[in-house]
């Protein structure tokens, strides 16, 4: 076979469409197998002579120990390396067929017309009662498909087929085939979808696979030679590869990377789409047209090319028009007395699109059909919106136009099924649509075993979609029943699916937890049998110890963990038993045991368990978070930094982890003096004010690079926790420390806004929180044109830039005072004193005098409030100390000394009025306003103070006051 023909067959397998031109040019057996596979005749491929040679079984002697063998031991032909391109292609086709058969049995339907034992070939000397039955093969496959402690779903149909596909596709090197990495990607995606929780492959393995996938985009597989010198990208193959790679990222929780790949896939096909608005109606009684959200989209790919039916595809139509009848799942009618079935657009153009928009010519109510691959891309973009947005109405409104655009033109069974599923999920939380959502989900489950559409059509775009398996859909239906309060129906589904954890939750909701405990104990002690165990052991109800040992260790360990959750008084014993039963492979056991130690304050033991758990499954963000908290408790700052770093890589929107990561950076490199451990770690996201300040005596020992990293972490976390005033406080302090004074001013304003009750998420009582030290430092930076950081020596260039922008900082700090602080804080002397300094620097003498006088009048225990109790809700923070600015009481001793200090304060105020008063008066007269007499104001200050403190007339300082008053009269 020519290399070009072999490459064409590989492309046909990836696109799941046979090229009729190959039928006349290629006569090799592999081409016939590929043609049969793409026609949906999977049994013909798996029972062909090449497949029978490959599936020759070797039954080991001594069947009593057969359970100890791996499945690969029964198929020695798998490990035989072939150097012939034809043989490699044949093996690839057989492996793909096994994979597609497993997907048909568990995802798309209809049911297979053969069993695993039908395709195996046993030697003639094999006895009839050999132990390699379907039940044994499936059970053994389920056990081997468990990965890093995460069990595979034990009731999947024919898991032996997936294990066969793994053995075939990974045992050969396939040096002559280009598409092997792509099929490894599809194999990995399928394997991830049958695990209880996704488990990321080892980093080197995943990196190597992604590198090969990236190289495929520029290889001959994804390009087309148009002339002898021009090579162009094949848009459909390139888009499919990007889309499937993005779905893998989505499954592994890397939503940002997935979003980028989905957008690249849209660019590859030339898909144009725009979310905009158009006038229309959504209810039957709506009289006025309102702007409705709509997705305008247009394909660049030719739909006729994909809808063209060849002689291989077993379809009932041969036309190439887009109006042909396509067999797809039924979309149930809403039948609501108010809502329309779909939005009726009354305008022929969108309300926001301009003539410059490439889609402005489209009629929102009558858009052209989209290519099925473009429909798959739009549905993938819905997944991204769902993952990167909070659960609220805006997300629903944003996703609905994407789904409606796909549902308008049904062209493929799998795509239409996925769109209906997404719509039912959106409608599940609305009173008027919850009934259709539930019935639609039930209809999707019921139509899977039917044969209303061809196998080829159902599998054609399967890998370009994130379509759940049959048992996941049924579980979702049970969750829907439970949310509606129909627990009996939910229990029936859960018990049939043998999802015992959900069964236990249902009984807990029914306030019958003892029933859940009894079920788990019955399973562990053999009084209750799972379906696969019954099939494997036959109808005999007596369970021997040897047969019970065959029970999948991973599932048994999960049951012990579940029992530990239900019986807290014996939790440690049950978790330890689970770890022992799994032979040190159960990640769930280590996660549970680590959490148990953490809840009891045994942080060192928790660190050991959780590190073992995350090594098995590094995608569990909660495990990483608790590990980081435990590391903070034992002051392992490097370990905590790594743990919280993994948290934010898994979930970029985890503001709590960003905050804790910043705290770890601030503690790394610090030398703790004495027996204390510095500030307590705020591992639970409390974010107290002292979080960022730490111990002032050792703060300078933190490397400046760590402070910058902490500042960046807090800045990132605030994007996702904008209303968290404690995180803003930490950000403010670190910003000052690294010289980011503009950000410090912004953060200080946010703290005041949120704690004053005017913020959107404050809900806080206790008064305004205001850090006077930071405020004064900002004023210092303005008045002295300096950076004002503890690392000024290391920041020479930054200091110069700050001096050049001091004017901008002055405006920022002035706005902070006048728009944020002063309207909310009216009785704090330090605030007014700082404001007076700022006004003095700016030459606003009238405002300066007023500010200094306000500071004089509001100073607790000072001359301006002598003999008067001043209460304020303002919480002034200074360093690590917090004090109320109100005078809750007076000290008994030292009254004379305090009075003398008050005298000096009065003299200071008079000096201020003597210096600034004339300037303020000139300023006010120049503005055409009546200027106050500063001498009169000064005399009033002195007289008022003397009137309030007549009991001190015998003190020497009293004469100074009398002389000062006489001086002001002249």
Image (cartoon, grey):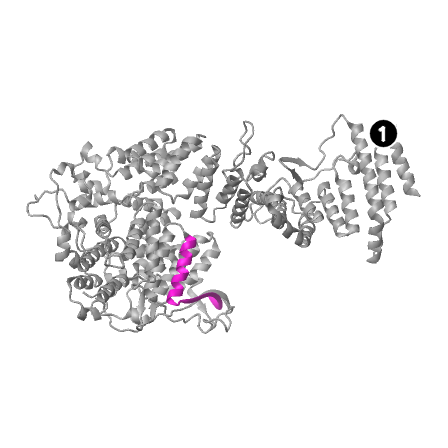
3 and 907: which one is in front?
3
Where is residue 735 drawn, in percent x and y? 59, 46
- Describe the element under mark 1 as helix, strand or loop: helix
Q: Residue at x 45, y 66 (%)?
A: 274
State which region is magenta.
Answer: 255-281
Residue 763 position in % (x across, y down): 58, 44
Which residue is label 1 attached to?
Answer: 952
Kindly give the residue lying farthest to the right in the view shown: 970
Q: Quadrant of the N terminus?
A: bottom left
From the viewer's side, name the closer residue of 272 and 693. Answer: 693
The reply to whether the magenta stretch includes residue 679 is: no
**Farthest top residue?**
893
261 part of magenta stretch: yes
Rendered location of residue 673, percent (x, y): 56, 29
Compare residues 364 and 900 and report the one nearer the observer.
Answer: 900
Residue 47 visible somewhere in the drawing: no
Up/down of 566 relative to 498, above or below? above
In this rendering, the count of numbered labels is 1
Is residue 715 rendered to the left or right of residue 403?
right
């Amino acid at each position: 076979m020519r290399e070009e023909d072999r490459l064409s067959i590989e492309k046909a397998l990836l696109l799941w469409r046979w090229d009729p031109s190959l039928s006349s040019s290629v006569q090799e057996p592999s081409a016939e197998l590929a043609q049969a596979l793409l026609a949906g005749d999977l049994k013909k491929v798996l029972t062909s002579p090449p497949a029978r040679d490959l599936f020759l079984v070797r039954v080991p002697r001594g069947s009593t120990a057969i359970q100890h063998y791996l499945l690969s031991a029964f198929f020695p032909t798998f490990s035989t390396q072939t150097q012939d391109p034809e043989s490699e292609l044949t093996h690839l086709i057989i492996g793909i067929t096994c994979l597609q058969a497993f997907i048909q049995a568990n995802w798309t339907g209809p049911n297979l017309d053969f069993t695993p034992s039908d395709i195996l070939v046993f030697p003639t000397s094999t006895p009839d009662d050999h132990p390699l039955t379907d039940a044994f093969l499936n059970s053994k496959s389920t056990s081997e498909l468990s990965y890093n402690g995460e069990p595979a779903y034990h009731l999947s149909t024919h898991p032996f087929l997936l294990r066969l596909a793994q053995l075939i596709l990974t045992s050969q090197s396939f040096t002559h085939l280009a598409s092997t990495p792509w099929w490894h990607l599809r194999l990995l995606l399928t394997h991830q979808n049958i695990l209880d929780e996704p488990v990321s492959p080892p980093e080197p393995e995943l990196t190597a696979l992604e590198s090969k996938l990236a190289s495929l985009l520029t290889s001959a597989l994804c390009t087309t030679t148009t002339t002898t010198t021009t090579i162009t990208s094949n848009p459909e193959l390139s888009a499919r590869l990007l889309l499937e790679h993005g779905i893998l990222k989505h499954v592994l929780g890397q939503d940002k990377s997935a979003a980028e790949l989905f957008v690249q896939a849209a660019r590859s096909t030339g898909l144009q789409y725009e979310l905009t608005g158009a006038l229309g109606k959504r209810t039957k009684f709506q009289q006025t047209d309102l702007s409705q959200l709509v997705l305008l989209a247009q394909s660049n790919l030719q739909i006729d090319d994909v809808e063209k039916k060849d002689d291989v595809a077993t379809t009932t139509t041969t036309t190439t028009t887009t109006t042909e009848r396509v067999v797809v799942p039924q979309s149930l009618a809403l039948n609501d007395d108010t809502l329309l079935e779909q939005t009726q657009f009354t305008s022929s153009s969108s309300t926001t699109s301009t003539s410059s928009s490439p889609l402005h010519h489209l009629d929102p109510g009558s858009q052209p059909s989209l290519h099925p691959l473009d429909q798959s891309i739009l549905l993938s973009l819905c997944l991204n919106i769902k993952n990167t947005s909070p659960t609220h109405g805006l997300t629903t409104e944003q996703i609905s136009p994407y789904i409606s655009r796909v549902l308008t033109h049904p062209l493929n069974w799998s795509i239409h099924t996925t769109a209906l599923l997404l719509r039912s999920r959106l409608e599940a939380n609305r009173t008027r649509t919850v009934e259709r959502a539930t019935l639609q989900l039930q209809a999707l489950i019921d139509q899977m075993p039917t044969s209303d559409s061809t196998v080829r059509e159902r599998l054609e775009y399967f890998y370009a979609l994130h379509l759940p398996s049959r048992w996941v859909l049924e579980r979702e239906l049970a969750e829907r029943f439970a949310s509606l309060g129909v627990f009996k129906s939910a229990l029936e589904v859960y018990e049939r699916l043998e999802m015992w954890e959900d069964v236990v939750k249902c009984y807990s909701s029914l306030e019958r937890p003892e029933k859940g405990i009894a079920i788990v104990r019955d399973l562990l002690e053999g009084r209750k049998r799972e379906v696969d165990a019954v099939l494997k052991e036959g109808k005999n109800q007596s369970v021997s110890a040897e047969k019970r040992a065959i029970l999948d260790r991973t599932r048994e360990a999960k049951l012990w963990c579940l029992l530990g959750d239900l019986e807290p008084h014996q939790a440690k014993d049950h978790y330890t038993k689970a770890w022992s039963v799994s032979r040190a492979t159960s990640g769930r056991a280590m996660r549970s045991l680590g959490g148990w130690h953490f809840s009891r304050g045994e942080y060192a033991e928790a660190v050991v368990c959780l590190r073992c758990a995350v090594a098995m499954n590094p995608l569990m963000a909660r495990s990483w978070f608790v590990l980081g908290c435990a590391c903070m408790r034992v002051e392992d700052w490097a370990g905590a930094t790594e743990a919280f770093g993994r948290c934010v890589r898994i979930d970029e929107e985890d503001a709590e982890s960003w905050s804790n990561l910043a705290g770890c950076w601030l503690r790394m490199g610090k030398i703790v003096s004495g027996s204390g451990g510095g500030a307590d770690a705020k591992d639970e996201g409390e974010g107290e004010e002292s979080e960022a300040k730490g111990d002032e005596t050792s703060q300078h020992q933190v490397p400046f690079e760590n402070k910058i990293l902490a500042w960046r972490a807090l800045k990132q976390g605030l994007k996702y926790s904008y209303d968290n005033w404690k995180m803003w406080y930490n950000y403010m302090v670190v910003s000052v420390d690294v010289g980011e004074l503009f950000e410090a001013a912004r953060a200080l304003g946010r703290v005041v806004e949120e704690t004053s009750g005017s913020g959107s998420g404050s809900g806080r009582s206790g008064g305004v929180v205001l850090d006077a030290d930071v405020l004064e430092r900002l004023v210092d930076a303005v008045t002295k044109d300096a950076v004002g950081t503890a690392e000024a020596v290391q920041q020479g260039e930054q200091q110069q830039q700050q001096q050049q922008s001091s004017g901008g900082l002055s405006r920022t700090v002035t706005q902070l005072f006048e728009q944020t602080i002063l309207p909310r804080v009216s009785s704090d002397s330090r605030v007014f004193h700082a404001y007076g300094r700022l006004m003095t620097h700016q030459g606003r003498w009238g405002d300066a005098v007023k500010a200094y006088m306000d500071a004089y009048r509001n100073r607790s225990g000072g001359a301006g409030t002598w003999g008067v109790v001043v209460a304020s809700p303002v919480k002034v923070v200074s360093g690590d100390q917090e004090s109320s600015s109100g005078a809750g009481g007076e000290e008994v001793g030292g009254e004379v000394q305090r009075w003398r200090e008050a005298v000096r304060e009065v003299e200071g105020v008079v000096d201020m009025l003597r210096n600034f008063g004339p300037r303020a008066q000139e300023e006010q007269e120049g503005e055409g306003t009546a200027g106050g007499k500063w001498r009169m104001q000064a005399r009033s200050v002195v007289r008022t103070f003397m009137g309030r403190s007549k009991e001190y007339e015998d003190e020497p300082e009293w004469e100074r006051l009398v002389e000062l008053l006489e001086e002001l009269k002249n």
